[in-house]
Image: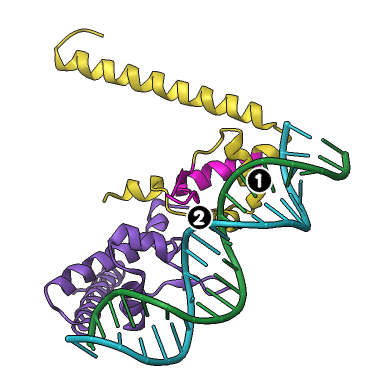
Chain colours: A purple, B yellow, C green, D cyan
Amino acid sequence: MGTQDYKTKKVISIGTVSELTGLSVRQIRYYEERKLVFPERTENGTRKFSFQDIEILNDIANKREEGVQTYEIRQEMLKENKNRNDLHRKMLKGQINAHFNLRN
Amino acid sequence: MGTQDYKTKKVISIGTVSELTGLSVRQIRYYEERKLVFPERTENGTRKFSFQDIEILNDIANKREEGVQTYEIRQEMLKENKNRNDLHRKMLKGQINAHFNLRN
DNA sequence: CGTGTAAGGAATTCTGACACG
DNA sequence: CGTGTAAGGAATTCTGACACG
């Protein structure tokens, strides 16, 4: 298992996430409801978060302190993902073109 | 928080460790008793493991399958740690000497 | 909208002990 | 020695709901 996996593997329960982020369990569940984080579920339904989720939750906490609403936070996150995807597509295209000796 | 921290931060509860390693909860507790792993404890006493602990437990599982006893596994681990420390000391000494323009 | 809380239930974890081998 | 299991208790987590603002 590579080191990157440690960041994204969902293994942390909500109580621990609460301690690590300073957010209440109620808040964390609500942010999931608002589609800001996406924990996995075990067979019996308990949520499991990754370290990456914790980073995201810390970002959310900062935004919330600035008074940003969850809906807006979600929009920002969607936009960032779009930008990242666009960039990926661009880079991929560049690589493919280079591979076939085409001009960009 | 750096990426290395994700590997050593103790945040995983014993049930999840059991799933990840294939070991029974009983076995994991016993290996702690035999000083092969050192989970942290929350205020109320539940064990928390790191990804590194999971790697160690996987190693232990392999050794046990080969019939190696916990006491021997412990001795091997202590020896490895000693070697690592010796190496570190050696490298550190080399750096210090280089810093002061001494000969090794 | 965002968060607290009491409610009832299900699943987890803990320790010390007995069992087996 | 290494591991399973039943025992009793404490703490966690879950959902749906009511409250407040």
> Disc 2 marks which amino acid?
Ser
Dot 2: within a 10 Å radius of its alpha carbon, few (fewer than 14), some, or many (20 or more) residues?
many
Residue A93 at x, y percent in the picture:
27, 74
Outermost residue on the left side: it is: A66
Residue A19 vs residue B35, the one in the foreground: A19
Residue B22 vs residue A63, the one in the foreground: A63
Q: Quadrant of residue C15?
A: top right
**Residue that mark 2 sits on:** B13
Residue B80's place in the image compared with A26, above or below, is above
Mark 2 belongs to chain: B
- Give the spatial CA distance, label 1 vs label 2: 14 Å
**Residue that mark 1 sits on:** B27
Residue A72's place in the image compared with A98, above or below, is below
> Disc 1 marks which amino acid?
Gln
Instruction: Name the residue rendered at 66%, 45% in the picture.
Output: B27
Left or right side of B84 for B28: right
Does the magenta portion include B11? no
Residue B17 at x, y percent in the picture:
55, 54
Instruction: Name the residue rendered at 29%, 66% in the picture.
Output: A23
Mark 1 belongs to chain: B
Instruction: Name the residue rendered at 24%, 70% in the picture.
Output: A91
Left or right side of B59 for A36: left
Q: Are marks 1 and 2 in contact (CB under 8 Å)?
A: no
Residue A6 at x, y percent in the picture:
41, 55
Element type where label 2 sits in the image: loop
Outermost residue on the top side: it is: B103
For the magenta stretch, what is the residue range?
Answer: B39-62
